[in-house]
Every structure is written in C-alpha cells, then in structure tokens.
Amino acid sequence: MTTIDKTATVPSARSGDDHVGPLLEVRDLHVEFHTRDGIAKAVNGVNYSVDAGETLAVLGESGSGKSVTAQAIMGILDMPPGKIPQGEILFRGQDMLKMSAEERRGIRGRKIAMIFQDALSSLNPVLTVGYQLGEMFRVHQGLSKKEAKAKAIGLMDQVKIPAAAARVSDYPHQFSGGMRQRIMIAMALALEPDLIIADEPTTALGVVADVADKIAVMYAGRIVETSPVREIYEAPAHPYTKGLLASIPRLDQKGQELFAIKGLPPNLLHVPSGCAFNPRCTMAQDICRADIPPLLPVTGTDGTELVGRHSACHFWKETLHG
C-alpha cells in the first residue's frame, strides 16, 4: 500500500441455504504475532459482517490489518508466529475458529474463496495454468483430467483470456501480470463459492465508490469507521477517513499537489496510547492521547441515528458536522 489509497473488497455471492443472518460475521477478532522483539497486535477487536449479495470494501494503509483479517477468515495464517487469542468468525452462523482443520478445508475454495494480491507468487511456476485451474475440479468434484481441462478452458474464457484453448497448457511466466491476476480470479470463481475475498483488488478509492455497498475503515488493527458507501464519501465521520478521501485526485484540481496524511502508521509493537491515529491527527487533544475511543453509532444534527454509520473518534461530531 501507499500512504493513502489501499483497499480490499469482500464481495459475497448468492446464498442457497436457509441460514438467517449475515453470510459472514466477524466478532471481536484479535490476531497477534509473537516475535523476538515482542507481540505485534495486528488485529484488535475487529467486528464486521457481510450479507449474501453484498459487497464490503475494507480500506486502510499497509499494516492496518486488512490482509491479516482476511487470512484469519480463510484459515491460512502462519501459526506460529500468528495467534488468534479471542474472537469469532461465523460463516452461516457457524464459528470457523472452532472447526477442525478438515472442516475448514471443506469450506475453503468450495464455500469461501480468496483472490490473492500477488498472482505471481500465488501460482505454482512449474505447473501449467490449466493444471492448476483443473485441480479445483479434480479434487473437489472428482472430475477426470479431460473434464477438468475443459472446465479450465471455460473459466479462462469467462475471465476474458484470449485463445484460452491454446493457452491452457502455458505456464504462469508466459502470461502478463494482468493475465495472471485473471487466472487467480478464475480459480476463485471455479467452484462458485458463496463468499469471495479479494485482497487488494484496487488501489483507487474512486473505484470503491462504484462497486461497494458499504465500507469499513481500518487503522492499526481496529475498525475506526463503518458506513454505507455513498454517505461516507459525502461526509466522513473520522479524521483518518477524511484524510484518505481527501487524497483522491480531482479533475477540477489539475496541477495542484495531492493531499497526503502526514506521518506513518504506527509500529504494531509500539502502538500509541489512546487513539492510535492521534500522532497524525490535526484534531487530536489530550483525551485522544489517553483514551481509546469506542466504535459508536453516528447521529445526524437532529440526534437521529444514521443507519449503518459508526465512528471510533472522540470528535466525530466535529468531523461529520463541522
């Protein structure tokens, strides 16, 4: 990520069962890494949910905890050094953190799929893309090699890879970076999962406004603001979100220097006391350096609660209505 514009989206597909409630619900999730220098608290009490047919975009800079949260959901964290000391990850109401490794494998790929950020390192360089795509069908659906190859070609066509039938036997290094990313998308779509997690699908905040239904903003392992997409772009309720959105290039400001939030995200081994954003915040006061602000509902000027809006800032009213 750059200083201001990293995003991650979590789109969900249609659900076919009778489960009532969110397709995915993350509750009070904590993830920490035990290192020689101490414990790095990468995720600190994250809560969010995704309904069937909904797209959630998770925004934040490098080190904010987006990818670690996604890896925890997928069950692919390296443990050790990673550890999940508390929290719940509910998929269709069932806590995946309480499942066996075999049960998690049954969900991964079939029910929840992930599009990784780095396609080159995610694909096996010594196996053809057709073999890697077909493996999903051979392992999970018991198809023959011939049937799996046909499915692989169909997926490559689906993601608009030219001459798919001729290129199914090519290796990853024979594709451009963009084509390799399309292959990763094809792998995620292969088994028609209910939930797709896309790690860093775009670095453009403007794109998020067009594809997401709601947004969660993360900073130093915490959710600092949640909102429906339109409302947060019109009036953010956290200084960090305001800074992220101010960095979006505008056509009416050609030639002007782009805004950037001063300073850097904190070292997770030494997170500042109080609000972690306080050293970089122009609105910070003594209370910000002493007390961690809880994520609370946001209200309008008339005191009415704004649906789906929450902010973890002592001065959210001044940010939103100022």
Image (cartoon, grey):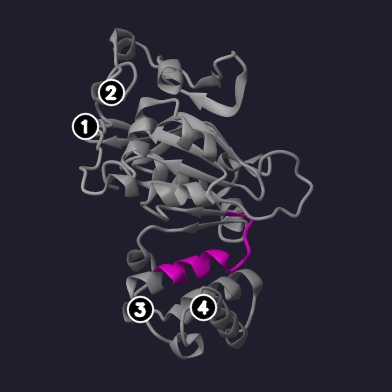
Query: Splitting the image into 4 quarters, where does residue 292 fall?
Result: top left
Tell me if 113 is positioned left or right of 316 in this view. right
Q: Which residue is mark 3?
A: 175
Mark nearest the camera among 2 and 3 is: 2
Residue sitting at x 39%, y 32%: 241
Cα gap from disc 2 to disc 4, whole angstroms:
46 Å
Q: Which residues are magenta?
A: 181-195
Say if mark 2 contacts mark 4, CB within 8 Å. Answer: no
Q: Which residue is mark 4?
A: 156
The C terminus lies in which quarter of the figure? top left
Q: Quick one: 101 or 276, which is closer to the camera?
A: 276
Cα gap from disc 4 to disc 3, whole angstroms:
12 Å
Question: Against 108, is 252 above or below?
Answer: above
Q: Earlier in the sequence, mark 1 or mark 2?
A: 1
Q: Position of residue 136 (x, y in %)?
A: 56, 71
Mark nearest the camera among 1 and 4 is: 1
In the picture, the disc for residue 281 is 2
Residue at the farthest right position: 18
Residue sitting at x 26%, y 49%: 254
Q: Residue 8: within the magenta?
A: no
Residue type indicated by callout 2 = Cys
Q: Quick one: 179 or 190, which is closer to the camera?
A: 179
Q: Is residue 228 visible?
A: no
Q: Which is the main secondary structure of the residues drawn in magenta?
A: helix
